[in-house]
Amino acid sequence: MVFRVRPASPSDEDATGRIEVAADTVLIDRFGALDWPPPTPPQERTAAPGFVLVAETIETTDATDAAGAKDATVVGFVHVLEIDGHAHLEQLSVLPSHGRRGIGRRLVEAALAEARRRGHPRVSLRTYADVPWNAPFYASCGFIVTEPDTPLLRSLIRIETDLGLFEHGHRVQMTAVL
């Protein structure tokens, strides 16, 4: 089995919705959260300015030959918003059953490459500082902790406050320079 990253299509919306719900359960369990914000509806995500990339596993006749693909299954996605000339990694989700296989890293790398191709000098994100698959993972992908320095980035803190995300731990902004 191999996997590839490609631009999402409308036919991927059901899969990305299920993936985000499944990935959120890992955080919900970690925090013992009784009230967790619902995921962004997939149709809203794909209609937002920016791009969504999906990772899919490919069953092949030969594990080294994706050209012999028999069946593909979407197992993760990354969503990057493009607002006011800024690229912001809004969501990265991988099915827990496919975690720790490099899929999340490949999605982040592909998102950074696409943002660079689109002319963005950097990509920001917001995440939990002390969750190993959050800030430490993003640091290993080249992101560093930064301060919100635009109206958009400052507005994200208000949104996270309204959603109650700070109740579960310290959140930080991180930025990768492209």
Image: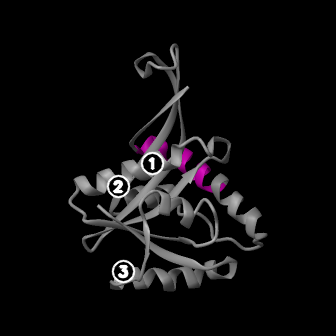
Residue 9 versus residue 117 in the image, above or below: above
76 shown above or below 60: below
Q: In the picture, residue 152 is in which quadrant?
A: bottom left
Where is mark 2, residue-wise? Answer: 112
- Identified by mark 3, the residue type is Leu
- What is the x, y in percent for residue 13? 49, 48
Per the image, label 1 sits on a secondary structure element best described as: helix
Q: Is residue 102 magenta?
A: no
User: Which x, y percent locates residue 146?
Assistant: 41, 78
Q: CA distance from mark 1 to mark 3?
A: 24 Å
Residue visible at 58% across and 84% down in the picture: 162
As helix, strand or loop, the secondary structure at mark 2 comes to helix
The C terminus appears in which quarter of the rendering?
Answer: bottom left
Q: Which residue is mark 3?
A: 152
| Residue identified by numbered label 1 | 107
Q: Position of residue 40 (x, y in %)?
A: 53, 63
Residue in the picture at 58% in, 41% down: 101
Query: Which of the two residues, 29 or 174, is positioned nearer the viewer here?
Result: 174
